Image: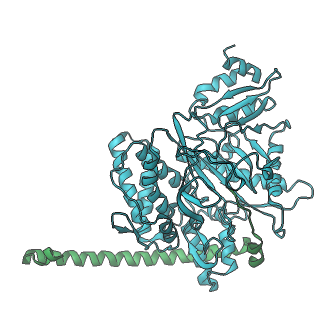
Amino acid sequence: MATRDSGGGQQHTNRQADEVEEVAAEGNEASDLKERHEKLSEDVDSLLDEIDDVLEENAEEFVKGYVQKGGE
Amino acid sequence: MGIETEYGVSVPGQPNTNQMLASSLVVNSYANRTSSSGSRARWDFEEESPLRDARGFELPREPAVDPSAPANEDDLGLANVILTNGARLYVDHAHPEFSSPEVTNPRDVVLWDKAGERVMAEAARRALTVPGSKPVNLYKNNTDNKGVSYGCHENYLMARSTPFGEIVRNLTPFFVSRQVVCGAGRVGLGVDSREAGFQISQRADFFEVEVGLETTLKRPIINTRDEPHADPEKYRRLHVIIGDANMSEVATYLKVGTTALVLAMIEDGWFSVDLSVDGPVAALRAISHDPSLKHLVTLRDGRKMTGVQLQMEYFEQARKYVENRFGSDVDPQTADILSRWESVLGRLEVDPMSCSRELDWVAKLSILEGYRSRDALAWDSPRLELVDLQYHDVRPDKGLYNRLVERGRFDLVVSEDEVTRAMTEPPEDTRAFFRGRCLARYPQQVAAASWDSVIFDIGRDSLQRVPTLEPLRGTRAHVGELLDRCATAADLVDALAGR
């Protein structure tokens, strides 16, 4: 960082241009991510409906009853 | 290489079921119906010595540390059979276990591991037809969340000449971090889930030491069991006990593919960097307990990095190694492993949820997060624990992983047709071919078999033992024509003896 700050005027300009580009790239990435996540959560909603249909009844009793002996 | 998986067993509504008997019922139901002849070859224990240590000594046999001893009276008389695909299907302690046949590559591990799941589902289905039996559910997971764990062990054949210290040094940081790719995901923190939350790995909380021989107590990151089931002068079998049982085919493929690459580099003396981690047991848990993947572990050289970055270091080493040793002659599967590994790690850094078509823990977490936001559930909700458990149910209609596949939500590595074939057919390029084909062709005459022998009873004075100590002999190329030619086991034994 220190060496970059001590650079001449020309370098300074270049660096700023780079920074602007970087920010822009991150901006796009973030909105892509958001879109992807929204699509993903719509998907998940319809999936949950299906899972509801196959999940075992009475979750609490079912997981309490799942007791194993040691293996290996 | 090969993989062996113990399945969780439960009879819903009957928590006090004798699990050894339930496991036996499942295994016997499959075995009895499969061999229509009624004759079943037993497992031959003669060459087994699970208490020999890779560091060069042998432990006294004690019931508490003995993983598969025939002398253990609890296991006496329990089901134990060999299948025509070369696998072993048996009851280990209180779990049905499928040990895959020996294979030569990661894709075949996936194939016969998946075949094992289908065998288990079919076995439970057949057990239902036994008069008076209750339905038995089988789960390909690793814990009951009440303090008990059961394993999914990988096995890799290595050159005996590889110094064990090198294996420990280079493999430990890899095992500490590979869970970010092949963790199966778990609801609950601590061996008995005393704290609520989600973690990446099923197994991480059950590991207590860095190196050791035990598999049931004080579990070690590196297991030292030295039982090659092959010529001990030439080979060691690295027994890996730290992995989660994966439903995802990509996860299994990457788990064994990347591990095999790292082992090849160790065998070849490639590592010039030391990636040793400070306090590996604590690091293993800390990485597992942070699904945001931000936790930093400290290396012995002072650097700090995340689990994903540590895997990246291994990936870079592997990429250079393969480039250096094989260049453009690299085999397609190795190239595929490298490319998928890089892609998954890159996406885990940016957006872990983008791996939900490939990785078990990510897929499971996305369902759980869905339930949490839709139904406002806290991490201690039994419904979330049920989702975690039922993800691993082997039934096609009930298992949540299987439902995801049905809906096209998972990337697959092998086709269902291939899996169906692998339930009965052995791999063609290892000794499992000889074992499996002998079982299929001469079911009445195979008295017993094991990884390194097939024993025939052909009505002579003594049993005829055919040793198979070399894992890459007994292949289709080697004995296929001979087996086709020999109509009876007696013909085969005579031909092998040069009579």
Which residue is the extreme one toward the right? B132
At 60% across and 42% down in the image, what residue appears? B227
Q: In this view of the protein, which residue sits in the foreground, A42 or B134?
A: B134
Q: Quadrant of the N terminus of chain B?
A: top right
Q: Colour of chain B?
A: cyan
Q: Quadrant of residue A28?
A: bottom left
Q: Quadrant of residue B135?
A: bottom right
Expressed as whole percent of the image width and height from the top left, the position of residue B489 reads 75, 24
At 71% across and 17% down in the image, what residue appears? B494
Residue A59 relative to residue A16: left or right? right
From this view, report whether residue B346 is shown above or below residue A25. above
Q: Quadrant of residue A19?
A: bottom left
Total labels drawn = 0
From this view, report whether residue B76 is shown above or below residue B314. above
Residue B336 relative to residue B70: left or right? left
Q: Colour of chain A?
A: green
Which residue is the extreme one toward the bottom? B376
Tell me if I can see residue B109 in this picture.
yes
Q: In this view of the protein, which residue sits in the foreground, B41 or B340?
A: B41
From this view, report whether residue B265 is shown above or below residue B457. below
Q: In this view of the protein, which residue sits in the foreground, B291 or B148?
A: B148
